[in-house]
Image (cartoon, coloured by chain):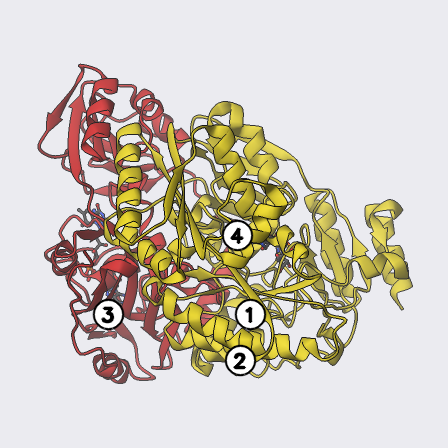
Chain colours: A yellow, B red
Amino acid sequence: MNDALASELSAALGPDRVRSGPLELTLYRRDASLLEGQPGVVCFPCTTEEVQAAVTIARRHGRAVVPRGSGTGLAGGAVPVGADGAEPVVVVTTKMDAILGIDEGTRVAWVQPGVLNLDLTRDVAHLGLHFAPDPSSQQSCSVGGNVANNSGGPHCLAYGVTSAHVLAVEVVLPDGSLALLGGLDPEPPGYDLRGAFVGSEGTMGIAVRIAVRLSPDPPAVRTVLVDFASIETAAATVTGIIAAGLVPAALEMMDARITAAVEDYVHAGFPRDAAAVLLVEVDGLPAGVEAAAQVVADVAEANGARGVRVAADEAERALLWKGRKSAFGAIARIAPDYYLHDTVVPRTRLVEVLSQVYEIAERHQLLVVNVFHAGDGNLHPLLVFDRREHGVMDRVLAAGTEMITACVAVGGVLSGEHGIGLEKRDHMGLIFSDADLDAQRRLRLAFDPDQTCNPHKVLPSGSRCGDLQSVPAGAWI
Amino acid sequence: MTGPVRTLPATDGPLRDFAAEVGPSEPVVAVGGRTQWTVGGDPDASAREVWAPAGVVAHEPAEMIVRVRAGTRVAELDDALAEGGQMVALDPADPERATVGGLLAVGHSGPRRLGWGPVRDTVLEVRFVSAAGELIRAGGPVVKNVSGFDLCRLLVGSLGTLGLLAEVVLRVRPRPPVAVWLQGAIDDPDRVRRILLRPSSILWDGSSTWVLLEGHGGDVDAEVKALGPEFAPVGAPPALPDDDRWSVPPSAIHQFVAGLHPGTFVAEVGVGIVHTSAPAPAPVRAVDPATATLHRRIKANFDPSGRLNPGRMVA
Ligand SMILES: Cc1cc2nc3c(=O)[nH]c(=O)nc-3n(C[C@H](O)[C@H](O)[C@H](O)COP(=O)(O)OP(=O)(O)OC[C@H]3O[C@@H](n4cnc5c(N)ncnc54)[C@H](O)[C@@H]3O)c2cc1C
Ligand SMILES: Cc1cc2nc3c(=O)[nH]c(=O)nc-3n(C[C@H](O)[C@H](O)[C@H](O)COP(=O)(O)OP(=O)(O)OC[C@H]3O[C@@H](n4cnc5c(N)ncnc54)[C@H](O)[C@@H]3O)c2cc1C
């Protein structure tokens, strides 16, 4: 059944860029989440025309299309689930990895979607510029994936998430036509379609060309590691820093278990016996940076910090950040599997929610570690486990749902940066009414009236406007 | 220091009353301060006028957010935030009259956009009344959120043609300790941009350049020095000509104003907005057919009977 589809795609894209063998398809059944689907065919277009051809051919065969970047998504956004049980065509954009142009004067770069986040920053470094959104996965995630997920990162506290750095997106719409959303001028005519597309998780079309804003490198940076004897004092310091009128470039928290694991892994000199550490970065012009670093130290000391270590040079700063960004990798030293949540709570409720997170994990006899963007209130509880243990997955899922519910109960939201995808779509009702979800569906249907682009993602089934089926049972883990 | 928390009764009552007043049928138009009443054309005479509720519901300095009803005057919001040492990146010409809802519905950012970012990035949550007369929420009261599709950005700049704003949660920021406008007889404003890290505004009228520096006093002093002796502090930026407002790519500003007399325009350097008092040649603003189709479908999906702000066009 997939053969006719595959041979038509091969004719359009070339046989080396279409895959339909069972072994190869297995590689594209999942992203970095624990969910799995089943692709019908996987293809690797290199040009806009090839993306249009792939979309048109899939459509002719009655197949859904699932856009995919590097597959590092954690919410199952790129997990292939078709409509009506027909296996979808996965369109992988990793071969569209050209930086098309850089305008140093206006600090804009046009890129293809498959360009890796860190490669873009490396490419413009000699101009004293960088791409501000910096997910911990920045070595491997694509700019297209960042746009689709409206991704964040440590430095988004001061500089804003991906949406604030995207000026225009050229999109192959689900009907195969090409549309330019947004533009280089500040107020393009019409509704803010660029704003609507960013964060749409592949449900509104495939980004094929993106204009991003580049940011000037700050001339001064101070990175401070603060060591606390309790989570409470660390969280109070976070609130205190913001209340003092500072917006640090980054404000990250790690709890005791993850700090010890990272230290064993990276040897960055993190205090192995700390109950929590904060990694605070301030940047900008020298006088403000010095003053801000002092405020950070003062607030930390007023809250009873055990130690304040300021990185002496760029090498030490890089080491501290390597520690933070390797946190997920370090988990492997604790247990083989982890399930990562991504919720946001009001910053002032951090302590309360964290203590509930620990309590929930304990009640389900699970280990939880916390490493997160504290300045944004963006929690990342990681449940670590060994999936070979009988019945453990049920406990992991139950504990995860309880944690999400606890975050929502204090006024939080379901996701701060990883997206809803397949993972959390059935939780959307926790924060949105049917009428709210119906409005979101109306937006989605304007782009994709037939719901052929990444179906079953983001919105739960049964919202009023459309008539989706529920996720096929096999899609879950 | 956490600053005061100003709290009005945080009930939905006024929002529900507004939704009831909008109702499910007949043409309606929301009225703010009427300072931007003609943007997008005149409303159809058939449209019934409605007013969004007003009042600052809650300012939470430690969360850097404020919940405010759409009919609130921008000046009133600003006063409320000032008590907590904060401000919001809305920058209207006439804050005493302009309302939060009207400003967001028009979606034009002010002359500090270079440093403060566009107004759409300020909006974290919206509650709006749909064409069906239902109260709808999008976004959430936290500074980072990707839970669902971004209706907040869609509504900013939609001129009340997709829904009527009832209440919003906005991101606030600390008030900068020092703010100074400088003016210099410099006809190469791009040079200024290259020297400064993050100026809040650079305005240029063809013969003179104005710069707004905000931040730590020591840094502002250093940047003033870096700008050189051509620049001197002034009390205020130039008045913005208000006959026309153009949006062009920042790199195209020079070309755009080439035929204009100095003094008949003020350009926002690095942003691309040009305010003019003399007729200017319209910039090329082609909307491709697929994009135009999207605009039409969005309007049709959100307002099937075309009752919201009839007569006004966004594109
Ligand atoms: C170790 C680790 C650390 C991480 N840290 C962070 C972090 O700090 N912050 C953060 O925000 N995320 C983080 N993530 C999650 C993930 O890296 C981001 O969501 C990233 O932006 C996904 O990019 P990708 O190219 O891998 O996209 P994929 O996983 O391939 O796809 C993600 C979504 O985008 C869609 N998509 C991809 N490309 C396109 C396109 N061209 N057009 C339309 N839709 C498209 C897909 O359909 C899918 O819904 C982390 C992940 C890992 C594994
Ligand atoms: C000379 C001049 C200079 C300006 N400069 C700036 C500037 O520097 N920075 C800046 O930010 N702005 C600027 N503006 C924009 C202006 O201040 C805002 O657009 C203004 O705040 C509009 O608010 P209003 O309450 O007067 O709206 P109105 O004029 O009453 O209404 C404007 C539009 O919004 C709709 N509307 C009003 N309320 C709602 C609602 N609750 N829901 C949905 N739709 C609604 C109306 O139907 C109408 O279409 C400028 C305006 C002028 C006239």
On residue A23, which mark appears? none
For the residues labelled 3 and 2, the Cα–Cα distance comes to 26 Å
At label 1, the amino acid type is: Leu
Assign a secondary structure to mark 4: helix
Hey, which residue is sitting farthest top in the picture? B229
Residue carrying label 4: A259
Q: Do residues under tags 2 and 1 come within 8 Å of each other at their CB atoms?
A: yes
Assign a secondary structure to mark 3: strand
Ligand 1 is within 8 Å of the C-beta of the residue at disc 1: no
Q: Do residues under tags 4 and 3 come within 8 Å of each other at their CB atoms?
A: no
For the residues labelled 2 and 4, the Cα–Cα distance comes to 47 Å
Which residue is located at x 72 percent, y 57 percent?
A55
Q: Horizontally, is A420 left or right of B95 in the view? A: right
At label 2, the amino acid type is: Cys
Residue nearer the viewer, A359 or A472? A359
- Screen quadrant of the N terminus of chain B: bottom left
Q: Horizontally, is A24 left or right of A276 in the view? A: right
Q: Please, which chain is the residue tagged with disc 3 on? A: B
Q: Please, which chain is the residue tagged with disc 2 on? A: A
Binning the other alpha carbons within 10 Å of mark 1 as few (below 14), some (14 to 19) or many (20 upward) gives many
Binning the other alpha carbons within 10 Å of mark 4 as few (below 14), some (14 to 19) or many (20 upward) gives many
For the residues labelled 1 and 3, the Cα–Cα distance comes to 26 Å
On residue A445, which mark appears? 1
